[in-house]
Image (cartoon, rainbow, N blue to C red):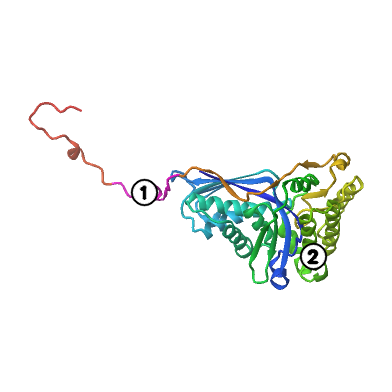
Amino acid sequence: MIISRTPFRISFFGGGTDYPDWYRRHGGAVLATTINKYCYISCRYLPPFFDHKYRVVYSRIEDRTNVDEILHPPVREALRYLNFDQGVEIHHDGDLPARSGLGSSSAFTVGLLNALYALRGVMVDKAELARKAIHIEQERLNEAVGSQDQTLAAYGGLSHIEFLQNGEISVQPLTLRPDHIKELSAHLMLFFTGISRTASAVVKEYLPEIVSKERQLGRMREMVDESLALLRDGGDLVRFGRLLHESWTLKRSLSPKISTSYVDQVYEAGLSAGALGGKLIGAGGGGFVLLFVPPDRQPKVMERLRDLVHVPIKFEFSGSRIIFFDPEEDFTEQARLWEERSRQAQRPEPAALTSADAKPQATGRGKHRA
């Protein structure tokens, strides 16, 4: 049995510049962090005694005899990509709702790959784990997703990530004083709007427009450098919050699909109660709203948004990890023997013995005893 734990993320600045269509022309960067909310994947080799070869448990249960029959796209493609002929059972659990803007889909893919490699006894470094997850989502599944979610899920931590025009990705953890990191974290409030949506479906509606918005995306890229300078210099976090507000205003201008009237109402209510800035996390359309609020103003924000679910968060710095490893026997040989016995059981029975054939032969040594 293997269990992987992979963190969700929140992105502060630079979102949108991590799409390959953009950064392969202009380069891109984000400032983001992973948080102490996780996706858990458990998997094990499936003994060969069942009618199914693969079991996948998430919001539904799939029992399949062939990989191609699996409906869950990342599971199907990960098993194909890794040439997983062995029977496996995969379970998913998460701390927060899926399709809510926190990179949960990519956390699932990263955690699944990590767990499947561990099941085979293979250790994968973080860079390779991120690359493989990006390959599955962007190339094999052809999803309209960027490259920051997989990278953050694999590496973890508060990081400055650069996306180079040659396709390379550079991850630079921020080395800040512990008290400064704690202060930054203490200003963050996360609220769930109650709206779930698939990020790639939302992005497909406006991605062609995004890559043509050079002024907005160029300014959003500049904000990454400005926010880094503020944090490294131990600057006033008020400016950080206001920069978040400017970034959200720019992002909303990219497309009317990014926000909704309800999300705008939530955000404005937060500002009127004392937030300095914030943003809708993820591609848009719903999910979680992040607000940047000085601690002394947070009770008022909590009261104003009391109808929403508030999720306390902290930064996390580990990335995707194997948290349980109990190596099991590979059932490949047992499965082969089981299939051979099944085939033999289906062969025609030998001709029945005649009564003469079945009659015991006399031995002259007394009566036959059963």
Specify the segment rendered in magenta: 328-349
Residue 345 part of the magenta segment: yes
Q: Position of residue 323 (x, y in %)?
A: 56, 44
Residue placed most toward the observer, 120 or 84: 120
Q: Position of residue 137 (x, y in %)?
A: 63, 60
Q: Residue at coordinates 75% horizontally, 50% vertically from top-left?
A: 196
Distance from Cα at disc 1 to Cα at disc 2: 62 Å
Q: Secondary structure at mark 1?
A: helix
Mark 2, Cα crowd under 10 Å, few <14 / some 14-19 / many 20+, is some
Residue placed most toward the observer, 52 or 134: 134
Q: Residue 21 falls in which quadrant of the image? A: bottom right
Image quadrant where one finds the C terminus: top left
Amino acid beneath label 2? Glu
Is residue 10 in view from this perspective? Answer: yes
The residue wearing badge 1 is 337
Q: Position of residue 75 (x, y in %)?
A: 58, 54
Q: Residue 128 falls in which quadrant of the image? A: bottom right
Which is the main secondary structure of the residues drawn in magenta?
helix
Residue placed most toward the observer, 111 or 75: 111
The residue wearing badge 2 is 222
Picture disc at residue 289: none
Q: Position of residue 141 (x, y in %)?
A: 62, 62
**Left or right for 2, reference 94:** left
Q: Secondary structure at mark 2?
A: helix
Mark 1, Cα crowd under 10 Å, few <14 / some 14-19 / many 20+, is few
Q: Is residue 356 above or below residue 121?
A: above
User: Of callouts 1 and 2, which one flags the residue occurring earlier in the amino acid sequence?
Assistant: 2
Residue placed most toward the observer, 64 or 246: 246
Amino acid beneath label 1? Leu
Q: Is residue 83 above or below residue 301?
A: below
Residue 13 part of the magenta segment: no
**Residue most toward the left?**
364
